[in-house]
């Protein structure tokens, strides 16, 4: 288990752990968990009570598209990320 408050849903806790293992920083929620990418360009939210049962898979898919990750298509950074700064 990581340094963050444990997610109430086991499958989403596994998503947070997978992000952590990829170097993402997990921030505890007021309404959702925030995962910040090591590249400093991207962040994702993991909701406490997602409306979709596919939320965890979507978060992992978006994390794989991070510019730091080798599978980023054509270096694009507009795949659902919240960008900080002028990027």
Image (tube, rainbow, N blue to C red):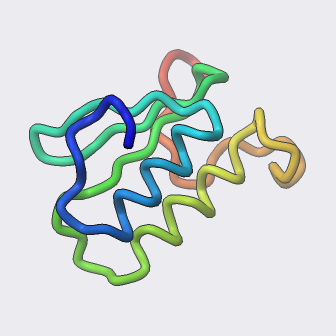
**Which residue: 44% across, 68% down?**
56
Q: Position of residue 52 (x, y in %)?
A: 31, 80
Splitting the image into 4 quarters, where does residue 40 fall?
Answer: top right
Residue farthest to the left, as pictured: 30
Q: Position of residue 63 (x, y in %)?
A: 61, 50
Q: Position of residue 65 (x, y in %)?
A: 71, 51
User: Which quarter of the image is occupied by the N terminus?
Assistant: top left
Residue farthest to the bottom, as pictured: 53
**Which residue: 33% across, 29% down?**
3
Of 22 and 66, nearer the camera is 22
Seen in the image, is 33 located left or right of residue 11?
left
**Which residue: 35% across, 57% down?**
13
Q: Is residue 17 above or below residue 83?
A: below
Q: Is residue 53 above or below residue 84?
A: below
Q: Is residue 83 above or below residue 59?
A: above
**Which residue: 55% across, 51% down?**
18
User: Which quarter of the image is occupied by the C terminus?
Assistant: top right
């Amino acid at each position: 288990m990581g340094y963050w408050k444990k997610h109430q849903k086991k499958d989403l806790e596994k998503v947070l752990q997978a992000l952590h293992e990829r170097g993402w920083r997990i921030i505890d929620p007021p309404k959702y968990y925030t995962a910040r990418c090591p590249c400093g360009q991207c962040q994702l939210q993991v909701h406490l009570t997602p409306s979709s049962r596919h939320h965890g898979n979507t978060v992992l898919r978006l994390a794989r598209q991070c510019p730091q990750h080798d599978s980023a298509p054509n270096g694009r950074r507009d795949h659902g990320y919240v960008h900080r700064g002028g990027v």
